[in-house]
Amino acid sequence: IASLFFVFLIAEFVVFRYVVPSGERPGTVYENGILKLLPNQRGVYRLKNEIAAQFNVNENGWNSRHNFYSLERSDAKIRVAIIGDSFVEALQVDYRSSLAEQLEDMLEGSEVYRFGLSGNPLSQYLNIFRREVVRYRPDIVVIVLSHNDFYNSYGAHSGRFISFLSIGIESGKVAGEVPPKPYTAAWLENLCKS
């Protein structure tokens, strides 16, 4: 038993930290009718040997170089909000190099806030806009669409996707909005999130 314990210690503190480092994935939280990233997380998202990108989840629950999205406005700055899915969340690239940060660098005198979470469909973009983005009073709102955003906006969802606003369809017609439901990850999901 002592030998096995020693092997586990070597694996945990040497192998998985220096030889084959494991990746991290930020946790999520359901807040104000929105599923977003758990605030104040930092780490490295890894995918095989292809991706090793730093993430920085701010106080507001979004991956960004801004540690805090301010509700206060400066008339001297143009405020842009970008809403989307994994392309906007951008865990696959360093948080300082995403499209929002590049746009902010190109537009002198601007601040660009991004509101992205992997798996968000178009209907959830509307929910994020209504419940979160309008509070920041952006001058410009950019919605980044992907190929599956329309299809995933309607129908029954399971897992964490129950926390996304969706469109109800009955008899081939739009029946209205299906409000999001709170989602709490199971303990096993939290254990295996990396």
Image: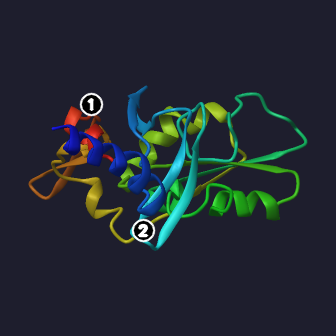
Give, as a three-letter code, the residue at label 2: Ser
The percent coordinates of residue 61 (x first, y second) are 53, 36
Q: Residue at x 42, y 40 (%)?
A: 127
Secondary structure of residue under mark 2: loop
Q: In the visual, does 137 lie left or right of 56?
A: right
Q: Is residue 180 visible to us here?
A: yes
Give, as a three-letter code, the residue at label 1: Thr
Tell me: residue 120, above or below residue 179. Answer: below
Q: In the visual, does 178 lie left or right of 142?
A: left
Quarter holding residue 181: top left
Of the numbered discs 1 and 2, the one sitting upstream in the chain is 2
The percent coordinates of residue 162 (x first, y second) are 24, 40
Q: Which residue is mark 2?
A: 146
Secondary structure of residue under mark 1: loop
Q: Which residue is mark 1?
A: 184
Tell me: residue 131, above or below residue 47. Answer: above
Q: Nearer the viewer, residue 178 or 144?
A: 144
